Image: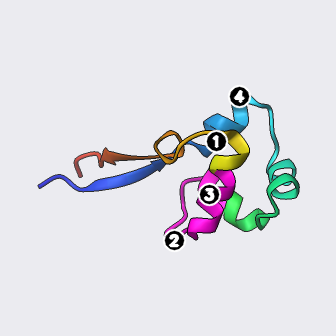
Amino acid sequence: MERELIKCHLSRLMGERKLKISDLARDTGLHRNTITLLYQETATRVDLEAIEALCRYFQVGIADLLEIVDAPAA
């Protein structure tokens, strides 16, 4: 059975708009650490409020921010 994981597209969304983590933290009110963990795809837990804030900021749906993908075979 293949393992699935969640891919976060925050780095792509930020890159398209040439945003820095500090810019996004200031504009959304989210903690820099939360943004950094999502940007680097190392977050293990995320508050729904953070996901909502990011989706509203980028004007995208949840599926544009997060995606379930098959994990590479070990």
In the image, is residue 62 part of the stretch drawn in magenta? Answer: no
Q: CA distance from mark 1 to mark 3?
A: 17 Å
Q: Amino acid at mark 4?
A: Glu
- Crowdedness of circle 4 by 10 Å Cα count: few (<14), some, many (20+)? few
Q: Which residue is mark 3?
A: 52
Q: Which residue is mark 4?
A: 16
Q: Earlier in the sequence, mark 1 or mark 3?
A: 1
Q: Which sits in the foreground, 37 or 25?
A: 25
Give x and y (percent) for residue 39: 63, 51
Q: Which residue is mark 2?
A: 45
Instruction: Identify the secondary structure beneath mark 4.
Output: helix
Query: Furthest residue to the left?
Result: 1
Find the magenta span and give its range: 36-54
The residue under the point 70% across, 58% down is 35
Instruction: Identify the secondary structure beneath mark 2.
Output: loop
Q: CA distance from mark 4 to mark 2?
A: 25 Å
Q: CA distance from mark 3 to mark 2?
A: 14 Å
